[in-house]
Amino acid sequence: MRAVLVGSVGVLLVGGCGSDDDSPGLIWFREYAKELCTNADVCCKASGQAHSISACRQFFGFLGGMSAGDAKYDAAAGKECLTLLREQRGQCGAAEPDVCDRVLTGTKGKGAPCSTNFDCAAPPDGRAYCLWGSGEARCEHELRGQVGSPCTSSDGGVSYVCSAEDGLYCSYTDDTCRELLAVGQPCTSADRCAGDAHCPFGATDAVCTPRAAVGAPCDGPDDECVEDGYCDGATCQSKKKAGEACGSYQECLGYCEAGKCEGGGGGTFCVTDD
């Protein structure tokens, strides 16, 4: 599904009202929206951003009303998705469970005209999405890569993704998916290291190295520190929330503007009814 977006949006949309004719998929979508918006409330407030649960639910209710009622609904996947989302509450920036992508699927095959992702039928081991191009939108497939799958090109018009969730990265030397590197293995970029490890920038004979915790010493590059931290030149510090003073964007959960941190919901969709 991947409905959580980055940023802050002001909306007030009418939609999401229930009726006796609602499909099971549309009923599920409203529960899904409720979980997303409740989770976002915790994370938006923690980062100093405004958020309205009711406006958020109206927004997602509008999205669901456009296509969810016509999509194929997987009840088991829907139940699992909601359960996992409830368990994630308060885990700001956590990736949405993969199973949520399998709850609602369309019926149109690859290359068919579409208006939203819900129109497109997903392949057995991947996802489908509605892609605009040359003045029209058509369903496209994106398969989960395996070791050896092509990653920067397509095979017969089907794209592959080397996902870190599957323990893979894309090797641009041969355009294939390879296994992420363990701590201690030689590396050339941070996106090739497994887990929370990083590849020391500019280091000779660099190897994947665990990131330093807040309070630990560091010597400059911010990727030395854990995800929600930055290096002040000597020590890893916690990134600052909206409203706190800053001297650079690295210091903020969001961004630094006019000496003050702005935004930064940890990848959360913060909605207001302004």
Image (cartoon, helix red, strand yellow):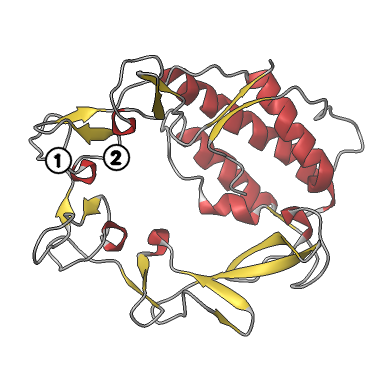
Q: Position of residue 163 (x, y in %)?
A: 43, 63
**Residue, x 68% and y 19% (percent of image)?**
54
Residue 67 in the image, given as x and y percentages of width and height: 81, 48
**What label sits on residue 220 in the rendered view?**
1
Q: Position of residue 123 (x, y in %)?
A: 65, 71
Question: In the image, is 76 to the left or to the right of 97?
Answer: right
Q: What residue is rendered at 74% in x and 26% in y?
A: 58
Locate the C terminus by quadrant. Answer: top right
Q: Residue 169 appears in which quarter of the rendering?
A: bottom left
* Lateral position of residue 85 relative to residue 158, left or right: left
Label 2 environment density (alpha carbons within 10 Å; few <14, some 14–19, many ≥20): some
In the displayed orientation, state which residue is furthest to the front.
258
Which mark is drawn over residue 212?
Answer: none
Q: Please identify the quarter of the rendering in which residue 207 is found.
A: bottom left
SS type, badge 1: loop
- Sequence-first tag of 1 and 2: 1
70 w.r.t. 132: above or below: above
Q: Would you call the spot at circle 1 few (<14 residues within 10 Å), some (14-19), or many (20 or more)? A: some
Query: Residue 240 occupies which quadrant of the picture?
Result: top left
Callout 2: SS: loop
Residue under the point 35% across and 64% down: 167
Separation of disc 1 and disc 2 at Cα? 15 Å
Name the residue type under label 1. Answer: Gly
Farthest residue, direction right = 21
Determine whether label 1 and label 2 are within 8 Å by CB: no
Query: How many numbered discs?
Result: 2
Q: Residue at x 52, y 78 (%)?
A: 153
Counting from the top left corner in percent of width and height, residue 100 is at 59, 49
In the picture, measured across the screen, residue 113 lies left or right of residue 11, that is: right
Q: Which residue is mark 2?
A: 227
Which dot, 1 or 2, sits closer to the camera?
1
Give the residue type that dot 2 points to: Glu
